[in-house]
Image: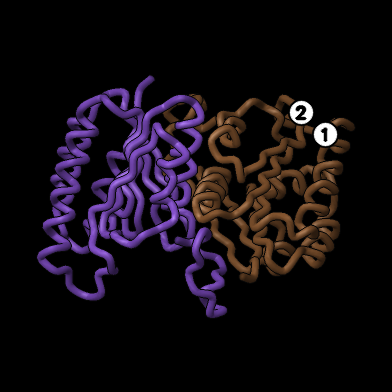
Chain colours: A purple, B brown
Amino acid sequence: MKGYVQIYTGNGKGKTTAALGLSLRAVCAGKKVFFGQFVKGMKYSELKAPQFLNQLEIKQYGRNCFIRKDPEEEDIRLAREGLKDLQMKIKSGDYDIVVMDELNIALFYKLFEVKDVLKLLREKHEKTEVIITGRYAPTELIEVADLVTEMKEIKHYYQQGVQAREGIEK
Amino acid sequence: MKGYVQIYTGNGKGKTTAALGLSLRAVCAGKKVFFGQFVKGMKYSELKAPQFLNQLEIKQYGRNCFIRKDPEEEDIRLAREGLKDLQMKIKSGDYDIVVMDELNIALFYKLFEVKDVLKLLREKHEKTEVIITGRYAPTELIEVADLVTEMKEIKHYYQQGVQAREGIEK
């Protein structure tokens, strides 16, 4: 089965969540999934998912806090290490699906360059499906992707003052 | 923790998938999830998810084929039974999250009425989070929901002739 490149972008809720759902469905069908998270180093509930799904691996390439304004050297170092790690995994053919969660955010903060990502995608193993998430997907990635969905915020309870809740948003 | 009403609608990929991801994250946080699927009776990969996640239950309220033009009596009967089942579950407080997958499609085909759904939501247990998916979310539901995301199709490989693939779309 040929693998494609999917992008989930936009300002609405559900991008990382859709990538998690896709991973769950794939594992149910006997597939092997690697889920890499850029920028994130916080202890999200989904980090426990491999305890239930042994065909799923998750790894984080970020610090334990969001990038506020300008990224620090440590943010750049971790993200570049992550990209290298994912590049190997996407090339290897060892995985049916590789998720690059918040890759667009890493690009937005210039932690690495879009040309590095385009190179990685050119070298991807034919069978491997690549899932990219995060706001602000750059045009260059949208051009090479096979499927692009924009999650658009119509209404959000953050506006009511609801904070991110464990097991729902994090 | 107070439960909210979330809607994932629009013509893009990722609605049911986001609901699955939300379910996975919730189970990782020790929560209990009921996932009801309207209109669907096909053997999707996600039906195997409870084998991995014992805090997740899935049930289908549809026939083993899509509704082509007009719904049949059996479609209506199954959907109404489903709505009754979900109403009990949403009221009971037994679940942290109840998903009503493709509810909007059931409404689109007039398998039951939007006023029945509004009643169900008014009677929902305070702690239970309700997730509604499907294209064509009616205005009445958008009004009462706390969070609404529109999945917008920007680019889709169906246009390249790619069929739904096991473990990815189904």
Q: Chain of mark 2?
A: B
> Quick check: B85 left or right of B31?
right
Residue occupying image coordinates x 32% and y 59% = A136
Cα distance in 3D space between marks 2 and 1: 7 Å
Q: Residue at x 62, y 43 (%)?
A: B56
Q: Is residue A158 above or below residue A25?
A: below
Residue at the image position 60 percent from the left and 29 percent from the top: B44
Q: Earlier in the sequence, mark 2 or mark 1?
A: 2
Quick one: SS at disc 2? loop
At a point 58% along the width and 30% down the height, the residue shown is B48
Which of B85/A142 is in front?
B85
Residue B79 seen anywhere in this rendered image of the structure: yes
Measuring from the top left, give residue B168's x and y in whole percent: 47, 32
Relative to B16, is A4 above or below? above
Q: Which residue is mark 2?
A: B63
Amino acid type, label 2: Arg
Chain letter of disc 1 in the image:
B
SS state under label 1:
helix
Residue neighbourhood size for the residue with mark 1, other residues' Cα within 10 Å, grouped as few (<14), some (14–19), many (≥20): many
How far across and down, in percent of the image, does residue A161 sit? 53, 80
Across and down, in percent, residue B165 comes to 49, 25
Confirm or deny contact between disc 2 and disc 1 (CB under 8 A).
yes
The single residue placed furthest to the top in the displayed view is A1
User: Mark 1 is on which residue type?
Assistant: Asp
When asked about the image quadrant of residue B101, the answer is: top right
Q: Are marks 2 and 1 on the same chain?
A: yes
For this view, does B109 lie left or right of residue A2? right
On-image quarter of the C terminus of chain A: bottom left
- The residue indicated by pointer 1 is B75
